[in-house]
């Protein structure tokens, strides 16, 4: 039992609701006096006990540990309300970095075999505080952009369409010719495979319009990767897959993407192709409204332990990621990094048996998954693979990570929604029967051998999607109602009263 005569230890206040309300207390002195008067009664009636927790790892959410809580520097105050007010007013109240929570805020989230000063700035390597600040900054920018019309000085237009679709090649030529005719200052970039395409017939187009020479250009994947700032706007002609391809081409900075609907669904394609002259004229003259879509940065991390002659039975992925070996940067090295708009999927691939996948969030082991796979989705991707696997619909403005099991081997694995400020890691344990496979927006499918894992975190490079002006607030509801027939049923009949 605690000694009630000794001075109680006041728990550290680590956060506050900026919209907090002090209720009916009009005077802070009155509130302080009342709290002080009832302090002795509270001490006799309440005992605060901190359970021991390990600072480095937790093997499973069901297995307790006996490690002592790290020492910390706690601030003492007569009234915790005043302490919160001081923090909100920006007054100096002492550094919290000595506390357990403060130290956790400054820990890097993942392994990196190269020194920090060499310039690696992947989001998985940011500290908890840096990730939170980055996510908050993107959300604030998204809010501001949603209420603005951005007038652009358009000079370089990027046209994206499926080069193997004959109809879309005709559409590409139609839009390119209209733009080049509309304004002599426009430069139009189309895919380099169309330069010698018989349907697009660039040679005949330049011959019949000599003024187009030097203004009709051809983009390559390398140009998109190295000089994305070349383009002022992207015109996507096709379906949602074409928009995803735009996200894939521009792995870092993404120009605003204006998507014309020529596909079968159209969650991301907001404009009618038949009206493209009016749409483009209005957009270039009056401006555009942009919705910033959250993207994930996913990095494949390869285990180096098996290469050193260690027996698989002696290795433990949980120990390497959140245990005693978590600070050893040489257990894994990064293999490839992708920015994705929809989802990361880790599944069993061609293997006949289900996958075994370890799921981690920051420095915590969430659970071991036995299933056909696991889908980690952005809010934009909630209506794609995530929905098909039984996950929730999620408005794209929500700053969250959606985790959904694919045919889980337990009935209790329900979909979960996590904040976008964590670094999620999905890995294949060393004792797994088979390897798993990872895909990123359905592309770049790679094998994850035992000991490998994938980090998933909010990307520093969101995806700017152009929305129709004046339709932002109802655009998403309209899209799920139109494409999914969401909550569509015949209306219930009213009662007919008889006389």
Image (cartoon, helix red, strand yellow):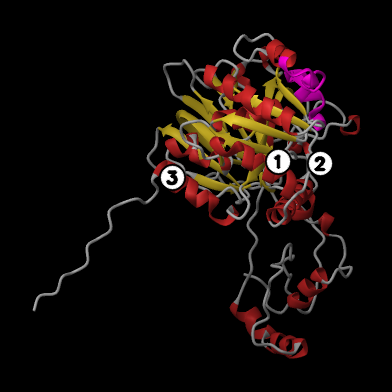
Q: Is residue 486 depicted above or below 311 in this figure?
A: below
Residue sitting farthest toward the left: 499
Tell me what residue is drawn at x 72 percent, y 68 percent: 18
Tell me what residue is drawn at x 51 percent, y 37 percent: 266
Q: Which mark is in front, 2 or 3?
A: 2
| Chain part drawn in magenta | 208-230
Residue 216 inside the magenta-drawn segment = yes
Q: Is residue 214 depicted above or below 277 in this figure?
A: above
Q: Position of residue 24 (x, y in %)?
A: 65, 87
Tell me what residue is drawn at x 80 percent, y 18 percent: 213
Left or right relative to 221: residue 264? left
For the N terminus, the quadrant is bottom right
Res. 153 mark? 2
Res. 13 mark? none
Residue 234 lies in quadrant: top right
Q: How far is disc 2 from disc 1 in space, using C-alphas?
A: 22 Å
Give the mark count. 3
Q: Secondary structure at mark 1?
A: loop
Q: Secondary structure at mark 3?
A: helix
In the rendered image, which residue does mark 3 sit on? Answer: 482
In the rendered image, which residue does mark 1 sit on? Answer: 462
Tell me what residue is drawn at x 46 percent, y 30 percent: 370
């Amino acid at each position: 039992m605690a000694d009630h005569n000794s001075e109680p230890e006041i728990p550290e206040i680590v956060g506050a609701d900026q919209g907090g309300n002090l209720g009916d207390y009009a005077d802070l002195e009155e509130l302080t006096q009342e709290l002080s008067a009832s302090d002795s009664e509270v001490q006799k009636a309440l005992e605060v006990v901190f359970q021991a927790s390990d600072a480095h790892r937790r093997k499973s959410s069901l297995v307790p540990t006996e490690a002592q809580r790290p020492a910390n520097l706690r601030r003492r105050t007569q009234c915790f309300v005043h302490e919160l007010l001081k923090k909100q007013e920006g007054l100096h109240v002492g550094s919290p970095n000595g506390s357990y929570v403060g130290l956790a805020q400054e820990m890097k989230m993942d392994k990196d075999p190269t020194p920090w000063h060499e310039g690696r700035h992947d989001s998985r390597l940011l500290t908890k505080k840096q990730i939170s600040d980055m996510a908050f900054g993107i959300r604030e920018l998204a809010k501001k952009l949603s209420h603005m019309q951005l007038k652009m000085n358009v000079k370089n237009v990027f046209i994206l369409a499926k080069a193997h679709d004959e109809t879309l090649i005709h559409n590409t030529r139609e839009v390119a010719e209209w733009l080049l005719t509309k304004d002599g200052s426009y430069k139009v970039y189309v895919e380099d495979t169309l330069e010698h395409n018989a349907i697009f017939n660039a040679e005949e187009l330049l011959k019949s319009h000599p003024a187009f020479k030097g203004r009709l250009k051809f983009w390559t994947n390398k140009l998109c990767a190295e000089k994305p700032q070349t383009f002022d706007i992207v015109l996507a002609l096709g379906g949602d897959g074409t928009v995803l391809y735009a996200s894939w081409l521009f792995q870092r900075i993404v120009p605003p993407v204006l998507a014309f609907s020529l596909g079968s669904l159209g969650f991301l394609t907001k404009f009618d192709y038949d009206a493209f002259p009016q749409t483009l004229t209005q957009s270039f003259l009056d401006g555009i409204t942009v919705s910033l879509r959250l993207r994930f940065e996913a990095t494949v991390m390869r285990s180096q332990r098996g290469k050193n002659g260690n027996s698989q039975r002696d290795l433990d992925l949980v120990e390497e990621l959140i245990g005693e070996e978590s600070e050893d940067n040489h257990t894994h090295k990064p293999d490839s990094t992708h920015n994705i708009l929809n989802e990361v999927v880790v599944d069993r691939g061609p293997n006949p048996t289900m996958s075994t996948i370890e799921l981690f969030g920051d420095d915590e082991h969430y659970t071991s998954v036995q299933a056909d796979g696991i889908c980690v989705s952005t809010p934009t991707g909630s209506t794609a693979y995530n929905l098909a696997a039984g996950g929730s619909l999620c408005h794209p403005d929500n700053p969250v990570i959606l985790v959904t099991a694919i045919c889980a081997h337990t009935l209790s694995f329900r979909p979960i929604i996590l904040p976008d400020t964590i670094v999620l890691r999905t890995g294949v344990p060393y004792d797994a029967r088979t390897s798993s496979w990872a895909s990123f927006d359905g592309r770049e499918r790679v094998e994850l051998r035992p000991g490998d894992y994938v980090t998933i975190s909010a990307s520093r490079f969101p995806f700017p999607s152009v929305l129709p002006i004046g339709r932002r607030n109802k655009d998403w509801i309209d899209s799920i109602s139109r494409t999914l027939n969401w909550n569509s049923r015949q209306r219930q009949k009213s009662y007919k009263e008889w006389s």
